[in-house]
Structures are given as C-alpha cells and as structure tokens.
Amino acid sequence: AQTVTQSQPEMSVQEAETVTLSCTYDTSESDYYLFWYKQPPSRQMILVIRQEAYKQQNATENRFSVNFQKAAKSFSLKISDSQLGDAAMYFCAYRSAIYPGTYKYIFGTGTRLKVLA
Amino acid sequence: DGGITQSPKYLFRKEGQNVTLSCEQNLNHDAMYWYRQDPGQGLRLIYYSQIVNDFQKGDIAEGYSVSREKKESFPLTVTSAQKNPTAFYLCASSQSTDTQYFGPGTRLTVL
C-alpha cells in the first residue's frame, strides 16, 4: 500500500523569506501523480501544485515550486517570498495513475506553516 | 460557475439521530469522495465512488453510508452507529486522470 509522510508538523518562516516543506512517499508503482494542497483557516482545500511522475521537470506555479526526486521518493514544496496569506496547513497527496485502477488519493498528515511579520 | 457545493455549512444533531450531508458537483467528474477531518488532523477517507451506482469503503467507513444514484450527487449519511461523529466533513470530486477538487466542507456537531 502507498503511504505519504510529512515529517514536519509545524514550520515557521519570516515574511519575504523562503521555506521548504518536506514530503516523502512510498510506492511500488512507476506512474502516479503528486499534489500539494493548502488549507487556510477557512478550511477550504486549495490545490497549490501538481506533478506527474513521468515528467522530469519540476512543476512551478508562481512563488511555489517543487523538488521532485523520483528515485528518492521525495516531493518537497518551496515557497518563495513568503506572504502572510501563505499561512495555512499544507498537505501532500499521492494518486496512482495506473489504469484501470483506483482513484483513491493518499494524504499526508499535514504541515502547519506560520508566517511571521 | 463550475464547482462543488456542500450543505449545510454547519449541522447540529442529537445523539442517536441519523443525519445526511449533501454534496453536489457540476464539474462532470466521474469520481466523488468523502473525507473526515478532526481538529489538527489530516484527511481520512470515508467512502469514494468512481462511477454512478458504485462506491467503495475508505479507511473509516463504519457508521457511515453513501449512495451514488446520479453523477452530480454523493450524499453521506452519518448514522447513529458512528460513535464520535463530531468533525469537519469534506466532499471532493475528480476526473479519471485529474486533480481532486474540494467543496467548502460541513461542520457536524453532536449535541
């Protein structure tokens, strides 16, 4: 069975600085998707970034980028120029891309990010 | 606007009562999901459905039931058999090879 591990329950960053959130996963599959979701105090889950395992290039979305290391099964999220609005819970998630298969998503336990003014 | 709606936003229930949480999507997604989130915790999968008239148990299905009679709708019933139902419930949907999108959630409190 696949697992997703976020080893940092809480992180802090100064406004305008850069922070990296860690995520590791375990799978025997070769094709899958990885995601980072943000959950602000409103509790609405918002997609931050998505990575397809077959793509070598790391995904980027404005100030958010990932470091995807497939061999190491690592998928870290880097937030540059941190803003107060980035304060939230961040969840890493995995989904198999094997067809036919399950559409089940596996979530990590989350990292709470605090942004200090 | 396309999206996922959940109603109500807040729900109160007396012990021993069943209650149904609504989830509707107009994204034409095949798959729908229900998650439970407890304070400071991650998401735990209750049930999911990959196609109409079919659904599978997730990790914590005991005390819950679902139906998937229409593609757009995936209601969750919290039964009296669920021992600790007070939690935040999130509904989500996805297309077969795409990202999962979430509704705004329902906060259920048992009085």
Image (cartoon, coloured by chain):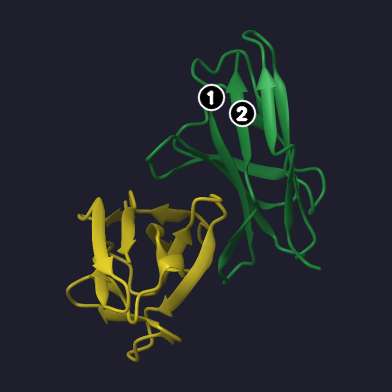
Q: Secondary structure at mark 2?
A: strand
Q: Is residue A25 visible?
A: no
Answer yes or no: are tags 1 and 2 on the same subunit: yes
> In the image, is A49 to the left or to the right of B94?
left
Chain containing the residue with disc 2: B
Q: Nearer the viewer, residue A10 or B28?
A: A10
Q: Are marks 1 and 2 in contact (CB under 8 Å)?
A: yes
> What color was chain A assigned in the picture?
yellow
Taking the spot 57% from the left edge, 54% from the top edge, the residue there is A44
Which of the 4 image quarters holds residue A14? bottom left
> In the image, is B84 to the left or to the right of B94?
left
Q: Position of residue A95 (x, y in %)?
A: 44, 63
Q: Position of residue B75 (x, y in %)?
A: 73, 38
Residue lying farthest bottom? A57
* Mark 1 burial class by Cα count in 10 Å: few <14, some 14-19, many 20+: some
Q: Which residue is mark 2?
A: B108
> In the image, is A25 to the left or to the right of A48?
left
- Quick one: quadrant of the C terminus of chain A? bottom left
Chain containing the residue with disc 1: B
From the rendered image, report the letter of the chain displayed in green. Answer: B
Q: Which residue is mark 1?
A: B86
Q: Nearer the viewer, residue A23 or A111?
A: A111
Q: Secondary structure at mark 1?
A: loop
Q: Is residue A29 visible?
A: yes
Taking the spot 23% from the left edge, 70% from the top edge, the residue there is A73
Taking the spot 54% from the left edge, 18% from the top edge, the residue there is B82
